[in-house]
Amino acid sequence: MLLELKHVSQSYAARRVLRDLSFVLNTGDIGCLLGPSGCGKTTVLRAIAGFEPITGGEIVLNGERVSAPGFIVPAEKRRIGMVFQDYALFPHLNVAANVGFGLHGQSRTERNKRVEELLQTVGLGGSGQAYPHELSGGQQQRVALARALAPCPNLLLMDEPFSNLDVELRERLSLEVRDILKQQGATAIIVTHDQHEAFAMGDMIGVMHDGEIQQWDKAYNLYHLPKNRFVADFVGQGVLLPGKVLDANQVEIELGTLYSKTPGACSPVGCNEGSNKGSEVEVLLRPDDIIHDDASPLLAQVEHKAFRGADILYTLRLPGGNRVLSLVPSHHNHAIGEWIGIRLEVDHVVAFPKIKNAAS
Amino acid sequence: MQRLPTAISKAPTAGAFIFKFRLPSGWVLAALLIAMLTLVPVAVVLSSLITPEREIWTHLVEYQLPQLLTNTFWLVLGVGLGVAIIGVSLAWLTAVCEFPGRRQFSWALLLPLAIPAYVTAFVAIGLLDFTGPVQTLAREWWGPIEFPPIRSSGGVIAVMTLALYPYVYLIARNAFLTQGKHALEVAQSLGLSPTVGFFRVALPMARPWIVGGVMLALMETLADFGTVAVFNYDTFTTAIYKAWFSLFSLQAASQLASLLIVFVLVVLLAEQQTRTRMHYTQTGKHSVQARILLTGARAWLAAGFCLAVLALGFIIPVTQLLLWASEVVEQDLDARYLDFFWHSLALASFAALLAGAVALLLSYSARQHPGLLLRMTARIATIGYALPGAVLAVGVFIPVAWLDNQFVAAGWVQSPLLQGSLMVMLLAYLVRFLAVAHSPIESQMHRITRSVDEAARSLGVSGVSLIARVHLPMLRGGLLTAAALVFVDVMKEMPITLMTRPFGWDTLAVRVFEMTSGGEWNRAALPAVALVLAGLAPVVVLTRYRSK
């Protein structure tokens, strides 16, 4: 266990930015903080880096307390590397000098060796003499990464590292950066608002909202077993259909009865508990839970369709008026207004207690 | 004079005000102190407006004021109109139209900035006066003919317009270039001809910039001393100078200064007002726009107009200067010139260092403490560019003399220590040119973002090492520009130097003033050439910036 946040909170004036935030990151793991802008994820990063004090809880790095209310180990003493959203390269220094900036107390040859080694790693071997403004956005990003990795930091923090790059480069670079981090054995935390980036890079992902971590989990679980409505809504697509708890592991919805394969995993209401029997719930249905099947007697009307290349995302209207999403291979091309057959294939039953007066 | 203690006692009050919120750091105190350097002279000069001395006023009102006000009125009106018309038309031609020589003209038209207005002035008089070569030649060819007198409102206005139009040209040209071609294309697609489009779309869009440029030119006009002195055209600055030296009346000088500063503050207010309205409608690159192609007579008319302005504002004056200078260089260039050079160089270098350092301090403190307080402080500290040198000389001298008297009265020193020392002069330079140094440093300071600091800290570099390894290298360009600009401005500066220099500290500008007072144009040309050479440096910087 390298990094531990225990009940961290922070407030500016009267506003609470972070509340009761806890998570643990193991050595060599890559953690992601995922959330909409303004959720406080960058503040967490800056608190870990030592740029912001905290007003509650504590942060422990390598078994040593580094932040607590009224106590802060300054950023320059933490050996935490950081890659900034705007890269923050030093414009007056060339690439080699930028990368070597944090290498103190080494001989010139040692330093040059380490710099060249890192530039090789990030695919910029031989570019040491170039100046930052002569590089493209993606190259500047790599220099920033190399600079942060050079002093072998305890932990690497990356704040929206790919947000200034175009989509294609962003996807390629995020995989590349993950490989580099793994190869260097670095422990890292990456802040992003892009779930694909988080899924591609993170071993553990924390979904943040309103200064709180809603769920700290693996990508698979965030998608298939979200702990609350916010996570269900923010991660991936889907709809909530009204349903009723029947019995242990069973929920009835308009399309039939859903059975949870693992007893008690009917998350998060726990539909095997007797007390919940008969209670009204809302069930999460992902687009991949609804399979198109021409042979199925269950019919739904195509209301809207979005062509995506390999597949089409259909918005389907059920006879009872509810709508569901379905992801269908794109050669099943149906016209709007057509009735098509569907069937359910739900591995994880996710149901939330019904909110009174909820519109959906 | 008796108002002074009140003005000074404001400092601790302001300090206590912040004290309530948090301990004022060294940065805040330094910034407030710098702002006081500007505020005290202004307050001192303004205070003599509140405490008029009856005798002096009666004298002023009876003998001087009517003439001064009339002269100033015509000067401001004439130069304002002149720079607006010439500056805007040249800007439009070089920014939007296409004609032979446009590219060369677009930078060459900035060259008149390199010549101090008082130099253009004495060249004009030397050339066009009754005994000058132009009139002499005309008499030889056509017999006795009547020329309009060159020493007149018209003459001063023409010379000042030629010297100051680049302010409007530069700013209006930028406005035309950045406002984008689209607005004009929309106008054309709606059926307006380019000419109508200019008056109905481009000109109104550029108005805040144009007004800003004209206001800058008017500040220079009100501040001008050398030009009007050459023309014997009495304005407030020459009146202040005469009251100071011929009448030895500090009171009369400060009364006049207090009136002038009111005009200046009005112009300053107008300029600051227009600044808030300068929003770029289209940022980013100058689009590779299709220029309006001028053909035939119109093209030659455009080129001829540009050439005429350039010739009158730069080519003819410089040529004449060189001719005159070559006439006298052998007999005149002696050991005294070593002194003039040395004095100019020493003063300008020292002032450049001082202004650069103080501007850096001001900009740095605003960075350390972002917020309204230090933004306003910086704003106040840099209004000196609007204050005429003659006013500043009075405003700095009075409190310094007061301090001196206190020291003598307290028995700390035998005789006045500060007045008549270089310190007064440097202080006045500092106040006047702080803004010149501040703006290039400030614009580079914005490049040092918070994340640059944090990147350095996360790599284990902080404190003094951070300043030395990151901040200073990143600010180097801005610091150099600041120092160069102040250096040149101080070289050219006339009234502060004349009024506050220690005995015997003659500079190149002082030499120009003395020779032109005696009407010895060719002997004035020698130091003037040196000033023009120095003045070319910032123009080169400007054109380099613009070509980027």
Image (tube, coloured by chain):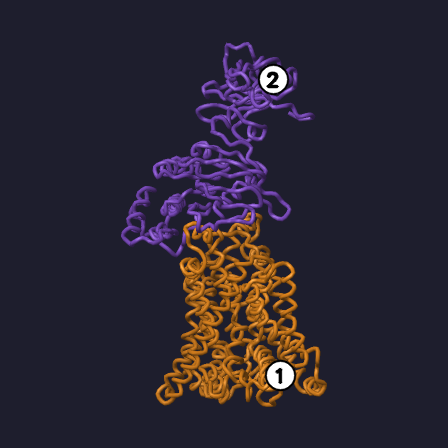
What crowding class fits label 1: few (fewer than 14 Cα within 10 Å), some (14-19), or many (20 or more)?
Answer: many
Tell me if residue B5 comes above or below residue A73 in the rendering.
below
Q: Position of residue B75 (x, y in %)?
A: 60, 76
Q: Which chain is orange?
A: B
Q: Residue at x 53, y 40 (%)?
A: A41
Where does label 2 land, which residue? A273
Q: Position of residue A311 (x, y in %)?
A: 46, 23
Q: Quadrant of residue B3?
A: bottom right
The secondary element bearing badge 2 is classed as loop
In three-dimensional space, the C-alpha distance between marks 2 and 1, rounded to whole angstroms, equals 96 Å
Which residue is nearer to you in this view: B119 or A92? A92
Chain A rendering hue:
purple
Read off the chain for label 1. B
Which is more foreground, mark 2 or mark 1? 2
Q: Position of residue A235 (x, y in %)?
A: 52, 30
Tell me if residue B166 comes above or below residue A101 in the rendering.
below
Residue B214 appears anywhere in the view: yes
Read off the chain for label 2. A
Tell me if residue A54 comes above or below residue B321 in the rendering.
above
For the residue marked with disc 1, what is the amino acid? Ala
For the residue marked with disc 2, what is the amino acid? Glu
Where does label 1 land, which residue? B253
Are the residues under badges 2 and 1 in a single subunit?
Answer: no
The secondary element bearing badge 1 is classed as helix
Which residue is nearer to you in this view: A293 or B230? A293
- Left or right, B491 with respect to B404, comes to left
**Where does the N terminus of chain B fall, quadrant-wise?**
bottom right
The image's mark for residue B17 is none
Which residue is nearer to you in this view: A177 or A57? A57
**Where does the C terminus of chain B fall, quadrant-wise?**
bottom left
Task: Answer whether labels 2 and 1 touch (C-beta < 8 Å).
Answer: no
Total residue callouts: 2
